[in-house]
Each structure stands twice: as C-alpha cells, then as structure tokens.
Image (tube, rainbow, N blue to C red):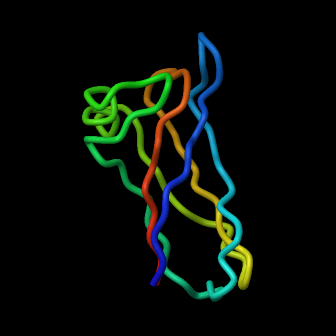
Amino acid sequence: MATGTATIDFGAAPGANEASIAVTGQGSIAAGSVVEAFVMASDTTTDHTANDHKYLPSFADFTCGDVIAGTGFTIHGRAYEKLNGTFQLRWAWV
C-alpha cells in the first residue's frame, strides 16, 4: 500500500469542468492495483482554503485510472460547474 498527495489544477478563471494529474514514481504499483483519490477537509492550497476543500466533493468527482505498472496512475477530476485554481487531493493504492 502507498499513500500520497497530488495537486490538481482546473486552470485560471473562468476555469474548467475537467482536470487531471499524473502521479509518477510508484515503482511498486502493479497493473491490477486499486487506486483511490479523495479530499481531506483540512487541506489547503494557495488558491483554496480548507473550507473550499471541505465542500469540494459536493461540486466535483475524482476517479483514478491509467495505471502503469512500476510507474504510476492518473487522477481525473470532473466538476459539475467550472472550477478554477488548484486543489490538493490525497490518494492511496493497494
């Protein structure tokens, strides 16, 4: 099992409905690994407060895919309305 953080960027205003971030450096990940991304309410970025992160799951969903054995995976974000700026995500895989 491994855990970590990644920063996803929806871009400058007016922003976008979709964004993704590649997570690399996962030398032990297998092609069949199960990967999850989630938001912690206490996280912050230079663009968004902990309160923004707390409510982010109400406005966007995050899925993981594109697992490459020995390398990493991609976190995909899709917002119901345009979002802008960066948000911190947590991830884990087994």
The N terminus is located in which quarter? bottom left
Q: Position of residue 18 (x, y in %)?
A: 60, 35
Q: Residue at x 60, y 19 (%)?
A: 15
Q: Residue at x 65, y 49 (%)?
A: 21
* Left or right, residue 48 beside residue 20: left
Of residue 40 and residue 56, the one placed in the foreground of this image is 40
Of residue 40 and residue 76, the one placed in the foreground of this image is 40
The image shows a total of numbered marks equal to: 0
| Quarter of the image where one finds residue 28 | bottom right
Q: Position of residue 68 (x, y in %)?
A: 73, 77
- The relative height of residue 15 versus residue 33 in the rendered view (above or below) is above
Q: Residue at x 48, y 63 (%)?
A: 4
- The relative height of residue 6 versus residue 17 in the rendered view (above or below) is below
Q: Position of residue 20 (x, y in %)?
A: 64, 46
- The relative height of residue 68 versus residue 21 in the rendered view (above or below) is below
Q: Residue at x 30, y 48 (%)?
A: 40
| Quarter of the image where one finds residue 38 | bottom left
Q: Which residue, as the protein is rendered here, is positioned at the far top? A: 14
Q: Position of residue 50 (x, y in %)?
A: 29, 32
* Left or right, residue 16 beside residue 38: right
